[in-house]
Image (tube, helix red, strand yellow):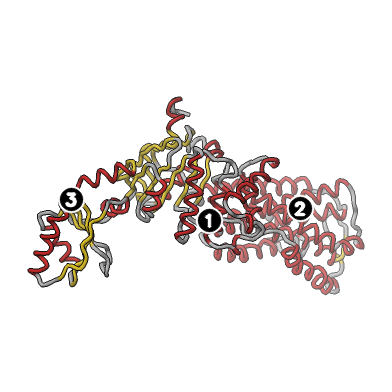
Amino acid sequence: MMLTRGNLGLQLISPLMYIFVVGFIYSSIIEEVEINGGKEISYTAFLASGIIVMQIMFSSMSAGVMFWADRRYGMFEQILTCPFERFEYILSKILSAMFQGIISGLVVLIISSPILVGEGLEISVLGTLYVIFGFVFGAFFFGALTLTISVLVKSNETFNMLIGVMFMPFIAFSTIFYPISQAPSLLKIIAYINPLTYASDILRTGLFGLGTEKLLYKMFLLFGESLIMFYIAVIGYKKHVEI
Amino acid sequence: MDIGGILVVLEVIKAEELVKYYGDTLALNNVSFSVYRGEVFGFLGPNGAGKTTTVKILTTLIRPNRGSAYVLGFDVLSEGNEVRKRIGMVQQQLSFDHFLSVEENIEMYGILRGVPKRERKGKVEELLDEFGLVDVRKKHPLELSIGQRRRIQVAREFIHNPEVLFLDEPTIGLDPYARRKTLELIKDKVMGGLTVFFTTHLLEEAEYLCDRVALIKRGRIVLLDRVKELKEQFSKRGELVEVIINGADKAYYNNLQKLPSVIAVFTPQDLGDEPVSLCVRNAEDVLSEILDLVTRDGKRLKIFNIKEITLEDIFIQITTKSNSNSV
């Protein structure tokens, strides 16, 4: 799947609907949301920053889609006869998906910037680094995850179905739509192992200059989970794709 | 590299007792052969015989369960990258990036093959010209005929000047003209010193292109020789005739085996109007024997042809179950 202007345009419909329709409607019900560090922001701004991460996640799914396209169009084996190592092929798909995720997330960030600016968007070097970190490793994790799924399943149809089923829990058990402090305790436990939670929290810290409480811990976890997922993708590939 | 100096020069491909299982199915059973520099080596066999599996092992796509293989002196198991740098591979399946044009496809392949940018542009132009793709350079593969698509597939493999080219049934789906054109392009490259490992089940192609052939059947190599010598060797065993007897069924044809001059009978799977091949000691003798038989049984000999033995006949004799063990 190539990142064309047409593709990008289509990919933006859903996040923009969330931010500018759902966000504004819900903001009349939920006024302010307290996030880490005790700072309060509007629900629209809270949701917008979460949707940016969700967009990164969806765009990063292209790693698995690209893998299946290579198989379907006969390019998979052809590429593997070229002079590079197997893990480089996997890494290239993940990096390519990561790139798409970052571009797509960046576009949503720019479009939603009027909302974010009105809610105390703070631009600083450190904040920008946090945002970049959230973008890069959020995209890397989900790129590796979809690639892992794509090597484990036997057909493109199963892959599409699994992806559809798997991403809903990731979103539901994360801080995309609501702050973790207000979630029931079982939900909290699941949310704490969900990389989407960390990517959202890191991004919000970077955007709104919130307290950096447990930030290093969250960054470490997101980084670690990304590496583990890449390792699983490589192992899965070796076990299920190479005969 | 475990191979000594002289072997590295002469033996471009060396397979030693390759064994490959897919689950419980034995796909390759102790396959051994060598391919020498500058030759076109045909690897022939019916569908499912193990041809593609062998190519996949030699091009480092899959690993054998046992045995070893070397390409240009590099071990395919432990020095895969060195092998991949020096080979090209045209697989059975048409394979392109459908988002890219013809020239972009070839150029992308140059990038994947690590061809430096300053050389790449010139090489793309050269290949477009050489393979007759200049007029369609801006088109996308799906807009082209199967023959043109196949030409892109072959052309791009020369972007990095490979020393060995693996062709896995490269003419599948092509009309006779496109087939001949593709083979001619490959033959031109062979004149320039390229070594080719060529799998096919189209025997006239093998006869046209190959210096030596190996015939693989159910994962085992059953014969390996130069094409000319194989034909001579089989001619010595007897002559080949084709017959059609009106009103004869398979059982009737199989009974021809009992005639004194017949060595073996090869009946096609679906008899229909197809002739039956007989390997005979002497064509004239067998003609009179068949005529006596059909007259006695009230049938009529419709066709009796004496054939020059082709690679295809040898292939059929080896791969078809005949009612004789003497061939």
Would you call the spot at circle 2 few (<14 residues within 10 Å), some (14-19), or many (20 or more)?
A: many
Residue indicated by mark 3: B325
Residue B186, position as x, y percentages in the image:
49, 47
What is the number of the mark on residue B150? 1
Residue B19, position as x, y percentages in the image:
37, 43
What is the number of the mark on residue B252? none
State the residue in front, A94 or B201: B201
- CA–CA distance in space, label 2 to label 1: 41 Å
Q: Residue furthest top?
A: B5
Q: Residue at x 7, y 68 (%)?
A: B296
| Amino acid type for the residue under numbered disc 2 | Phe
Both labels 1 and 3 in a single chain: yes
Would you call the spot at circle 3 few (<14 residues within 10 Å), some (14-19), or many (20 or more)?
A: few
Question: In the figure, is residue B136 to the left or right of A236?
Answer: right
Q: Quadrant of residue B33?
A: top left
Q: Given the image, what chain letter belongs to the residue carrying mark 3?
A: B
Mark 3 secondary-structure assignment: loop
